[in-house]
Protein backbone atom coordinates (compact mmCIF):
# COMPACT_ATOMS: atom_id res chain seq x y z
CA UNK A 1 0.00 0.00 0.00
CA UNK A 2 1.26 3.46 -0.87
CA UNK A 3 2.21 5.82 1.89
CA UNK A 4 -0.33 8.61 2.59
CA UNK A 5 2.61 11.01 2.80
CA UNK A 6 3.18 10.59 -0.93
CA UNK A 7 -0.36 11.65 -1.85
CA UNK A 8 0.16 15.43 -1.75
CA UNK A 9 3.53 15.43 -3.57
CA UNK A 10 2.06 13.11 -6.23
CA UNK A 11 -0.93 15.43 -6.61
CA UNK A 12 1.33 18.47 -6.97
CA UNK A 13 3.58 16.70 -9.47
CA UNK A 14 0.54 15.68 -11.53
CA UNK A 15 -0.86 19.21 -11.43
CA UNK A 16 2.50 20.62 -12.55
CA UNK A 17 2.62 18.09 -15.41
CA UNK A 18 -0.86 19.05 -16.54
CA UNK A 19 0.00 22.73 -16.18
CA UNK A 20 3.10 22.46 -18.34
CA UNK A 21 1.60 20.17 -20.99
CA UNK A 22 0.21 22.97 -23.20
CA UNK A 23 3.56 24.73 -23.13
CA UNK A 24 5.33 21.53 -24.16
CA UNK A 25 2.73 21.00 -26.88
CA UNK A 26 3.27 24.52 -28.20
CA UNK A 27 7.05 23.91 -28.29
CA UNK A 28 6.77 20.57 -30.11
CA UNK A 29 7.74 20.26 -33.76
CA UNK A 30 4.69 18.23 -34.82
CA UNK A 31 1.17 19.38 -35.60
CA UNK A 32 -1.45 19.40 -32.80
CA UNK A 33 -3.21 16.15 -33.79
CA UNK A 34 0.08 14.26 -33.94
CA UNK A 35 1.07 15.70 -30.57
CA UNK A 36 -2.22 14.47 -29.06
CA UNK A 37 -1.73 11.03 -30.61
CA UNK A 38 1.82 10.68 -29.29
CA UNK A 39 0.76 11.90 -25.87
CA UNK A 40 -1.68 9.01 -25.53
CA UNK A 41 0.33 6.43 -27.48
CA UNK A 42 3.40 6.82 -25.29
CA UNK A 43 1.27 6.15 -22.19
CA UNK A 44 -0.04 2.82 -23.51
CA UNK A 45 2.82 0.60 -22.23
CA UNK A 46 2.32 1.96 -18.71
CA UNK A 47 -1.43 1.39 -18.88
CA UNK A 48 -0.97 -2.16 -20.21
CA UNK A 49 1.52 -2.89 -17.42
CA UNK A 50 -0.89 -1.54 -14.84
CA UNK A 51 -3.66 -3.73 -16.28
CA UNK A 52 -1.43 -6.82 -16.11
CA UNK A 53 -0.64 -6.11 -12.47
CA UNK A 54 -4.33 -5.64 -11.65
CA UNK A 55 -5.24 -8.87 -13.45
CA UNK A 56 -2.91 -10.84 -11.15
CA UNK A 57 -4.35 -9.39 -7.93
CA UNK A 58 -6.28 -11.78 -5.66
CA UNK A 59 -9.52 -9.87 -6.34
CA UNK A 60 -9.12 -8.41 -9.87
CA UNK A 61 -11.46 -5.64 -11.01
CA UNK A 62 -14.20 -6.76 -13.39
CA UNK A 63 -13.72 -6.27 -17.11
CA UNK A 64 -16.28 -5.54 -19.79
CA UNK A 65 -19.27 -7.88 -19.45
CA UNK A 66 -20.98 -7.49 -22.83
CA UNK A 67 -20.70 -6.03 -26.30
CA UNK A 68 -22.54 -2.97 -25.04
CA UNK A 69 -19.70 -2.33 -22.58
CA UNK A 70 -17.19 -2.49 -25.43
CA UNK A 71 -19.33 -0.06 -27.43
CA UNK A 72 -19.46 2.36 -24.49
CA UNK A 73 -15.66 2.12 -24.11
CA UNK A 74 -15.17 2.68 -27.83
CA UNK A 75 -17.50 5.67 -27.86
CA UNK A 76 -15.86 7.24 -24.81
CA UNK A 77 -12.43 6.75 -26.41
CA UNK A 78 -13.68 8.40 -29.59
CA UNK A 79 -14.94 11.43 -27.67
CA UNK A 80 -11.74 11.61 -25.62
CA UNK A 81 -9.67 11.58 -28.83
CA UNK A 82 -11.84 14.39 -30.19
CA UNK A 83 -11.40 16.36 -26.98
CA UNK A 84 -7.63 16.00 -27.17
CA UNK A 85 -7.51 16.93 -30.86
CA UNK A 86 -9.67 20.02 -30.36
CA UNK A 87 -7.76 21.13 -27.28
CA UNK A 88 -4.38 20.70 -28.96
CA UNK A 89 -5.64 22.63 -31.97
CA UNK A 90 -6.95 25.40 -29.68
CA UNK A 91 -3.55 25.64 -27.99
CA UNK A 92 -1.92 26.01 -31.41
CA UNK A 93 -4.29 28.79 -32.54
CA UNK A 94 -4.82 30.80 -29.35
CA UNK A 95 -2.96 31.46 -26.14
CA UNK A 96 -2.03 28.60 -23.85
CA UNK A 97 -3.90 30.22 -20.97
CA UNK A 98 -7.09 30.76 -22.97
CA UNK A 99 -7.24 27.22 -24.32
CA UNK A 100 -6.46 25.67 -20.93
CA UNK A 101 -8.99 27.84 -19.10
CA UNK A 102 -11.77 26.93 -21.51
CA UNK A 103 -10.85 23.23 -21.42
CA UNK A 104 -10.90 23.21 -17.62
CA UNK A 105 -14.36 24.79 -17.64
CA UNK A 106 -15.72 21.66 -19.35
CA UNK A 107 -17.01 20.10 -16.10
CA UNK A 108 -18.91 23.30 -15.35
CA UNK A 109 -20.49 23.34 -18.82
CA UNK A 110 -21.35 19.63 -18.64
CA UNK A 111 -22.95 20.08 -15.21
CA UNK A 112 -25.01 23.04 -16.40
CA UNK A 113 -26.08 21.20 -19.56
CA UNK A 114 -27.02 18.13 -17.49
CA UNK A 115 -29.07 20.28 -15.14
CA UNK A 116 -30.86 22.02 -18.03
CA UNK A 117 -31.49 18.78 -19.97
CA UNK A 118 -32.26 16.39 -17.12
CA UNK A 119 -33.46 18.63 -14.31
Image (cartoon, rainbow, N blue to C red):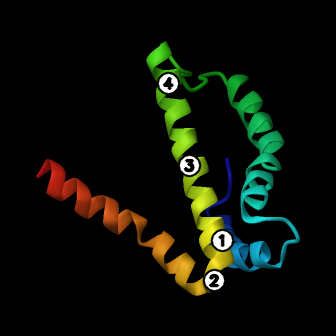
Residue 104, given in percent of the width and then of the height, sits at: 48, 71
Tell me the distance, in whole angstroms, between the alpha carbons under discs 1 and 3: 16 Å
Q: Is residue 49 above or below residue 30?
A: above
Q: Residues within 10 Å of mark 4 (few under 14, many from 20)?
A: few
Separation (CA) of disc 1 from disc 2: 12 Å
For marks 2 and 3 on the same chain, the one whose residue lies earlier in the sequence? 3
In this view, the mark in front (1 or 3):
3
Q: Is residue 10 above or below residue 20?
A: above
Residue depth check, mark 1 versus mark 2: number of the one nearer the observer: 2
Please give left or right for residue 109 compared with residue 62 in the image.
Answer: left
Q: Which residue is mark 4?
A: 71
Work out whether mark 1 precedes mark 3 in sequence or the reverse, and give the earlier one.
1
Gap between marks 1 and 4, in whole Å?
29 Å
State if disc 4 and disc 1 touch (CB < 8 Å).
no
User: What residue is shown with label 1?
Assistant: 18
Q: Is residue 5 visible?
A: no
Q: What distance separates the C-alpha of mark 2 from that of mark 3?
A: 20 Å
Seen at 73% across and 23% down, the residue is: 56
Q: Secondary structure at mark 4?
A: helix
Secondary-structure class at tag 1: helix
Mark closer to the chain start, 3 or 4: 4
Residue in the foreground of this view, choosing between 92 and 96: 92
Q: Which residue is mark 2?
A: 96
Q: Can you identify the residue that label 3 sits on?
A: 80
User: Rounded to the nearest whole Å, what is the CA distance between mark 3 and mark 4?
Assistant: 14 Å
| Residue 26 shown left or right of residue 5 in the figure | right
Amino acid sequence: MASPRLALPALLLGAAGIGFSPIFMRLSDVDPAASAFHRVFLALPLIWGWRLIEKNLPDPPPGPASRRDYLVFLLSGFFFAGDLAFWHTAVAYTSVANATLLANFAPVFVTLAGFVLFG
